[in-house]
Amino acid sequence: MNRRRHVRVECDWAVTAVGIELTGRETRFDARVRNASTSGLFLEAEVAANLAVDKPLRIVLPGGVGEVEAVVRRFLEHGGDGSNTTRWGVEFTELDLAQRAHLARLIFTAARQAADTEDARAA
């Protein structure tokens, strides 16, 4: 059963993320967003970052969304495919109205591109 409240779309966005430690120390890394919704995203990176559940993040999203505040909700895996890849489920904690609008447009565009790709394959 899918418990999600928001539709997720597949994507492949390059982002910069910053993990924030309790001490205030910040760990900056490049990552990929593999799917996204208006409430969160699936983040993947080639880094062994210490991003446990409830760890705060700042992520710079494309499409005019800019830097957003988020929190790790699920630590999914590290090195499960023999690489140094780490995957997390991340929830946005604060988005202003303009960020919500930009994010919705970005997600709609990704959904439209996926639909166009499916239509092209079916033709």
Image: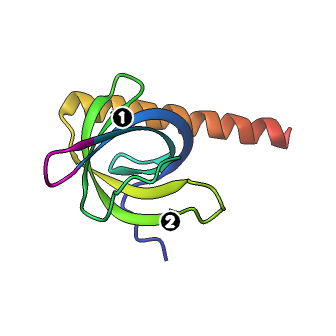
Q: Quadrant of residue 88?
A: bottom left
Magenta region: 21-26
Percent coordinates x, y for residue 31 in the rendering: 47, 40
Q: Dividing the image into 4 quarters, which one contains the C terminus? A: top right
Q: Which residue sits at x=40%, y=38%?
A: 29
Q: Is residue 25 magenta?
A: yes
User: In the rendered image, which quarter is residue 58 located in?
Assistant: top left
Q: Look at the numbered discs 2 and 1 and tell me whether their residues touch, using CB distance below 8 Å.
A: no
Mark 1 crowd level (few <14, some 14–19, many ≥20, 10 Å Cα): many
What is the distance, in whole Å, between disc 2 and disc 1 at their CAs?
A: 26 Å
Mark 1, residue position: 103
Image location (x, y in percent) of residue 39: 32, 50
Identified by mark 1, the residue type is: Leu
Q: What amino acid is labelled 2 in the image?
A: Glu
Residue 44 colored in magenta in the image: no
Which residue: 23% across, 27% down? 98
Q: Nearer the viewer, residue 7 or 45?
A: 45
Along the line of sight, which residue is nearer the eye, 102 or 85?
A: 85
Q: Which mark is residue 8?
A: none
Q: Circle 2 is placed at which residue position?
A: 77
Judge left or right: residue 122 versus residue 57: right
The rendered magenta stretch, by its main secondary structure, is classed as: loop
Q: For the residue labelled by badge 2, is the local secondary structure a helix, a strand or a loop? A: strand
Q: Residue at x 30, y 65 (%)?
A: 53
Position of residue 36 in the picture relative to residue 101 (left or right): right
Q: On the rendered structure, is 17 left or right of 120?
A: left
